[in-house]
Amino acid sequence: MTEERSLNFIEEIVEEDIREGKNGGRVLTRFPPEPNGYLHIGHAKSICLNFGLAKEYGGKTNLRFDDTNPVKEDVEYVDSIKEDVRWLGFEWANELYASDYFDQLYEFAVKLIKKGLAYVDDSSPEEIAAQKGTPTEPGKGNEYRNRSVEENLRLFAEMKDGKYPDGAKVLRAKIDLASPNMHLRDPLMYRIKHANHHRTGDKWCIYPMYDFAHGESDAIEQITHSVCTLEFIPHRPLYDWFIEQLEIFPSKQYEFARLNLNYTVMSKRKLLQLVNDGYVDGWDDPRMPTISGLRRRGYTPASIRDFCERIGVAKRENMIEMALLESCIREDLNKTAWRRMAVLDPIKLIVTDYPEDKTETFHGENNPEVEGGDGSREFPFSRELWIEREDFMEEPPKKFFRLAVGNMVRLKSAYIVKCEGFAKDTAGNITEVHCTHIPESQSGNDTSGLTVKGTIHWVSVRHAKTAEVRLYDRLFQVEDPSSEDGDFKDYINPDSLHIIPNAYIEPDLVNAVPGKGYQFIRKGYFTLDKNSTAEKLVFNRTVTLKDGWVKK
């Protein structure tokens, strides 16, 4: 452990366990996602914590899929989860599934029945809920609670053999209907579901509940530190009760605060709604907080790991600013992204004293922030250039240091030019800006003695390539859409995506690859979209150069 930061409370627990020789000093964690959706940034925090702890203390981490609900689970989600974990930079010791343990879990249930600690209940879900009582009133037992061990064993076997339809019976633990902890009031252990499972097919028609499968799976794998989020604190006594009654490996559960990020939603159910209702273009839409969405948008594994490190591990819930996540990716891309020129809202600049048939080649650094350099690229210069419309003003305000009649600016990595005039169309729109250049002012070999305050980017008209550019913004207009009145979808930001169908980019960008970050000079950080083709280049904006949201 380095001296640079203090230990979080889970690290303190692990270190104390190691000092005391618990589990022989062994550390084995697990990441147990349910394969019913794509992972999001909240899962990234759990991944970094579980895999990070194991790495820190010379241990290992299992990837275990909690596949106990066949109705909602799919191999597509399994594959996406594995891709996301590896992309974040982690590798698991064992790939496991709760379904691997279905036979063993069934035997565990039989053992509890034989001990008089579980029974088959024919009540409906509504009846069971009513019989459980309220937080201030104890529950009441029913006639099924007094069934004999023999009858319960027979009925449970018949449930397994498919004799009963969905919902006809459940298996419940017999604990304490007067417990102040509602989770201990005879919780469900098994329910009947005649559904095809993505791994076990039609072998089973009864499936264990999360609370029964989770702790037992931890124990089977001999997990030393089972780390989950705060909402599982009330579940911990039940986790411990099952392990104690079954007399199996004493895995221990520890809880930390989940990640809550503003201007988005983190519920898989709500994310699925956004996908199914067409508000976004799939789970990996760059506006989604999913890891695949962030990846497609241009976020890097390093930036997400850095974000998870900065927010830390706490015992109390809090809301994290989206601005912090954006700051992490800006910092990372500033150090790694290649600089390129792209014009998103073009207007033509004509260098009137430059020969029409002449082309020069200039050079620019790929990334000036890299110590020792990160190479360079060439780009052509000619008489006609595309510049940003906002870089010229007919009637400029004071301290406007870009182009206006009489003003001089430097064209990035090229010449200083002086604006001599402009042209308009019949509707009064400016169509061209006319400039002359200073031949002695070439970048890197400037002998003109001139000093200008403005530098603008450009792309040669003759050599420019076109691309679709997608400007993404925050998906919601309010900080916490889930807490607002009405439907959370009512608060979707109508300006979360702006598509520029024909932006002009410098020729080298035809060599761009998905996953590589590019800084479009003065415009933001971008990456090539996965669906881009040679015939149609598509770039997604990862993040702006500065945080402009506060101003909005």
Image: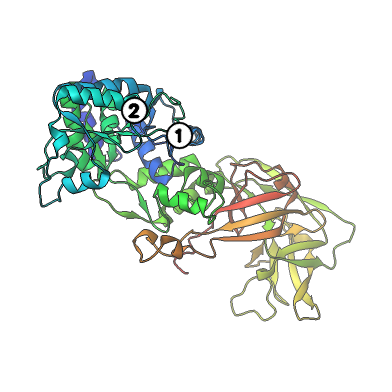
Return the x and y of residue 90 as percentages of the image width and height: 44, 31
Mark 2 = which residue? 163
Quarter-wise, where is residue 143 in the image? top left
Return the x and y of residue 468 as percentages of the image width and height: 68, 55
Query: Disc 2 residue type?
Result: Lys
Residue 359's disc is none
Return the x and y of residue 286 as percentages of the image width and height: 54, 50
Residue 450 vertical position relative to residue 177 in the rendered view, above or below: below
User: How far apart in space, not on screen, are marks 1 and 2 (Cα)?
Assistant: 40 Å
Mark 1 = which residue? 85
Horizontal side of 318 relative to 287 (left or right) equals left
Q: Residues within 10 Å of mark 2 (few under 14, many from 20)?
A: few
Q: Quadrant of the N terminus?
A: top left
Q: Is residue 26 visible?
A: no
In this orientation, which residue lies closer to the viewer: 82 or 278?
278
Query: Disc 1 residue type?
Result: Val
Q: Residues within 10 Å of mark 1 (few under 14, many from 20)?
A: many
In this orientation, which residue lies closer to the viewer: 359 or 155?
155
In this orientation, which residue lies closer to the viewer: 196 or 349?
196
Q: Residue at x 77, y 62 (%)?
A: 385
Q: Is residue 207 visible?
A: yes
In this orientation, which residue lies closer to the viewer: 502 or 191?
191
Horizontal side of 505 relative to 135 (left or right) equals right
